[in-house]
Amino acid sequence: MKQGENLYLIDEICKEKGIEESFLSLGWIRELRKDGKICHIVRNSFDLNPSSCYHIVNDKYATYEVLKHHNISVLTHYILFNPNGEGRGEFAGNLSEEVDEIFNKINQEKLVVKANTSSEGKQVFIVNSRTEAIQVIQELFRENFLSVSICPFEEIECEYRVVFLDNEILYVYKKIARDWKHNLADGARAETNLENDEKLEEVKQLALRAGKVTNARFVTIDISKRTNGEIFVMEINGAVCMSKFIETVENGREIARKIYEKAIDKMFDK
């Protein structure tokens, strides 16, 4: 399996700290061993978050429900279930009627449809009509996604990515995009000098609250800023991948190294 630069960093950190590594399942699982303790990194997911947290933050609708329950500002999601999916398929209704109801609630024609368990901005689409929404949803169901969400389309000025570890903010950077997707993989630009950013402290406090109520230990939290200045949680990522950050940001490798080193130290805390 081809490694990203972030995984080479982990190799370096382990070598320096005397941590033995084994690569299992064709490299998908990285086993770390030191002083009789065994930890794992599965792709970009570190052996830190409890299972319940991992399932919550890797499901966009579940994240929305938990944050909303705690009155944390978050992008509104409406869920639709795949009638052929295992688990909650029995909650699926008439797709056309469900889509009509959601469009009426949101009361705007331009909406976003996304697979609940997608990542890196994949399987996320703007739709401009009920017909288009149904077509996209059916295609996602054919791709075996068990559920999808419909969200209002928001005019976003920028997005902040917050690196969160055990109730501490390790790092914050801003993502600036020319289009509606604020992902580095889609060409967004990372801005790291945020000393004079008037929203920085508010962003940190929102991220701390979101991390706490999801029982997260090591995640990244994406916080969007509307054109009117309001901020809200867009999503939480249980897999901490910094490959594009390393590739596109000056000193990105050094910054990522410090973050991963702290996470690995936490994994081996007695």
Image (cartoon, helix red, strand yellow):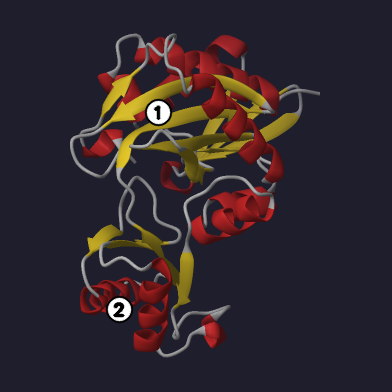
Query: Which residue is under mark 2?
Result: 138
Q: How many marks?
A: 2
Q: What is the three-letter code of the residue carrying label 1?
A: Met
Using the rendered image of the protein, determine whether residue 95 is visible from the camera's viewpoint.
Answer: yes
* Placement of 93 over or under 139, stated as above or below: below
Front one among 47 and 201: 201
* Placement of 229 over or under 129, stated as above or below: above
Q: Residue furthest right?
A: 270
Label 1 vs 2, first from the N-terminus:
2
Which secondary structure lies at badge 1? loop
Q: What is the three-letter code of the residue carrying label 2?
A: Gln
The C terminus, quarter of image: top right
Q: Residue at x 47, y 23 (%)?
A: 199
The answer for how far apart the CA atoms under marks 1 and 2 are is 32 Å
Q: Residue furthest front?
A: 228
Q: Residue at x 36, y 68 (%)?
A: 107
The N terminus, quarter of image: top left
Using the rendered image of the protein, determine whether residue 14 is visible from the camera's viewpoint.
Answer: no
Q: x, y (%) of residue 204? A: 57, 25
Q: Is residue 108 left or right of residue 28?
A: left
Q: x, y (%) of residue 97? A: 39, 87
Which secondary structure lies at badge 2? helix
* Placement of 96 over or under 110, stated as above or below: below
User: Residue 242, which numbered label?
Assistant: 1
- Mark 2, other Cα within 10 Å: few <14 / some 14–19 / many ≥20: some
Q: Are marks 1 and 2 in contact (CB under 8 Å)?
A: no
- Mark 1, other Cα within 10 Å: few <14 / some 14–19 / many ≥20: many
